[in-house]
Image (tube, grey):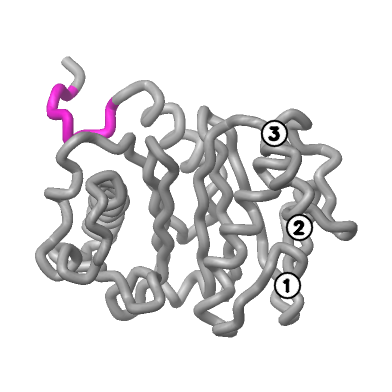
């Protein structure tokens, strides 16, 4: 029989996205997903709960869901019982030797981790599989962006997710605020370049959420 424990990601949407993430994650990167559930804030470890100032139940649930995934990914590589508190900058604080990224939309949380020995930078973003509104697309897209081969109804949304993931990946390296205009994305060839000179690899999936992974190999 399939598992019935509601804490285990086994819903069809989770299974589909988990398979898609496994297919796009490069070697050394581990990624997972979870539909956000009522009560997921209870998955926050005490140190994590204290570090997250958000009082809104929805945000705390999303943070709990994302860390639930991360805890299990860490356990899978032999690192258990480690808190992932929120730094004052808002970024998660990972155990020594680990790099990672968390993200969520209104309904789904995702996480990705890797060992620093394998991956030098890592970012993830998740978005609903819906066309990006025209006014937001006008802010996000720039002349150097290339997305001709992307699924056209969702190309703008994929571009948005890719730039968010790239920013998460490179900010810890350069500590510079980047706007959308500072990130040139080539979805056709799976890469991006920042105004700080960073070259970043990209992968994405649509199953059934748009998820983008940005990474720099060591």
Residue 167: image x %, image y %?
Answer: 59, 67
- In this view, 145 is above or below 216: above
Tell me if I can see residue 98 in this picture.
Answer: yes
| Above/below status of 111 relative to 166 | above
Q: Position of residue 96 (x, y in %)?
A: 30, 80
On screen, residue 114 versus residue 128, left or right, reads left
- Name the disc covering residue 185, or none: 2
Q: Earlier in the sequence, mark 3 or mark 1?
A: 3
Other residues around mark 2 within 10 Å, as few (<14) / some (14–19) / many (≥20): many
Does residue 9 show up magenta in the picture? yes
Mark 3 or mark 2, which is nearer the start of the sequence?
3
Task: Give the vertical position of 158 relative to 100 (above or below).
Answer: above
Highlighted range, magenta: 3-10
Residue under pointer 1:
194
* Contact flag, marks 2 and 3 (Cβ < 8 Å): no
Q: Which residue is pictured at 78% across the width and 49% down the height? A: 138
Residue 37, percent from left and from top: 24, 35
Q: Which mark is residue 154?
A: 3
Dominant SS of magenta comes to loop
Q: Which quarter of the rendered picture does the N terminus lie within?
A: top left
Measured in 3D between alpha carbons, the distance from the residue under mark 1 to the one under mark 2, in whole angstroms, is: 9 Å
């Amino acid at each position: 029989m399939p598992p019935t424990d509601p804490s285990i990601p086994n819903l069809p949407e989770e299974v589909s996205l988990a398979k898609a993430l496994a297919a796009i994650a490069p070697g050394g990167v581990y990624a997972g997903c979870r539909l956000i559930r009522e009560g997921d804030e209870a998955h926050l470890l005490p140190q994590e709960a204290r570090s997250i100032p958000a009082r809104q139940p929805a945000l705390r649930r999303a943070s709990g869901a994302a860390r639930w995934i991360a805890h299990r990914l860490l356990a899978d590589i032999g690192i258990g019982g480690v808190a992932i508190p929120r730094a004052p900058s808002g970024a998660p604080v990972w155990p020594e030797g680990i790099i990672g990224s968390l993200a969520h939309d209104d309904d789904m949380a995702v996480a990705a981790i890797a060992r620093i020995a394998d991956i030098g930078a890592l970012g993830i973003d998740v978005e609903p599989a819906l066309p990006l509104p025209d006014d937001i697309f006008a802010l996000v897209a720039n002349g150097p962006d290339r997305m001709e081969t992307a699924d056209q109804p969702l190309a703008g949304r994929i571009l948005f997710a890719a730039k968010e993931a790239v920013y998460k990946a490179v900010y810890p390296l350069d500590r510079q605020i980047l706007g959308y205009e500072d990130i040139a994305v080539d979805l056709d060839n799976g890469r991006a370049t920042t105004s700080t000179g960073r070259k970043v690899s990209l992968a994405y999936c649509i199953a059934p959420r748009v998820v983008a992974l940005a990474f720099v190999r060591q």
